[in-house]
Image (cartoon, helix red, strand yellow):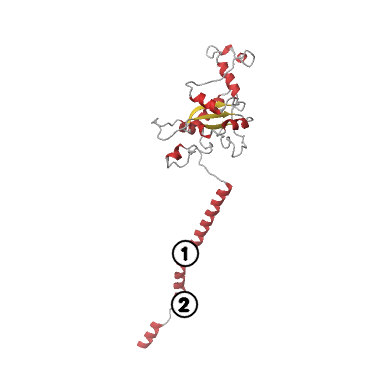
Amino acid sequence: MGMEEGIKDNASPPPNLRHTNQSRALLPMRGLQVFLLFFVLVLGISVVSMHMIKYLKIQTFAPSTLISPYGERDTLESFIKPPSSVWHFMNDSELLWRASMEPGIYRYSFKRVPKIAFMFLTKGPLPFAPLWERFFEGHESFYSIYVHALPNYRSGFPSSSVFYRRQIPSQPVAWGEMSMCDAERRLLANALLDISNEWFVLLSEACIPVRGFNFVYNYISRSRYSFMGSVDENGPYGRGRYSYAMGPEIGQEVVLIQLLLAKLM
């Protein structure tokens, strides 16, 4: 009996028990294989997505998100250096709020070169761009350029042009309506994002420089006054545009301002 019991103790386990033990041993291995396969799949999708974003230039932005055109600001230079492109994704409310910021200390801790902001309010192309190119040539540190055109217009200036990437986000503008004032305010707000801009000149595509840059810069920077150009004409396009039914709230001098706006558009 004792020998038989020893034989039974040394006997192999039943086949069903061996199969169960092998299945249990294989479960962790299969789980690890599934995890590795999932990890490789996710890694491959991530790499493909990064290449698509890089080569197709896909950008996603959350709506109504205030995005600074300056990016990361870890140094003083990155804070005061203007962006290479004036394009941004702020709406008008966000833009005006951002432009209203000003330093509480008016003594600069760095060498600041005051600049003139040339703000072009246009319908589309700039026919006198070559003339302006010559005007700005050699004075890159003393001016900034901003162009407000119709939203559906896309300029084709080369990267060597002073107008390259200087078109700001715009809205439709109609002559004689409040949208013109909104466009002017939009131009000024964009110019205020650059803390080096000290003086602001509003222009149209019909304007041309009649003096050299040095003369214009010195004349404006040394003056204590603001300047507005207007023409008083007796014809139908001057005083003839005034209706006495608008008086006395709106005097005839308002016609001069309307003429100025006509020159800008």
Name the side, left or right, on which 105 lies relative to 39.
Answer: left
SS for dot 2: helix
The reply to whether residue 125 is visible in this rendering is no
Name the side, left or right, on which 111 lies relative to 173.
Answer: left
User: Which of these two is toward me, 90 or 237?
Assistant: 237
Corner quadrant of residue 264: top right
Assess disc 2: are there few (<14), some (14-19) or many (≥20) residues with their C-alpha within 10 Å of its C-alpha.
few
> Relative to residue 220, is residue 26 depicted above or below?
below
> Relative to residue 141, is residue 255 depicted above or below?
above
> Relative to residue 173, is residue 30 depicted above or below?
below
Corner quadrant of residue 240: top right
Spatial CA span between label 1 and label 2: 27 Å
**Closer to the N terminus: mark 1 or mark 2?**
2
Where does label 1 land, which residue? 32
| Residue drawn at 49 percent across, 59 percent down | 39
Name the quadrant of the C terminus. Answer: top right
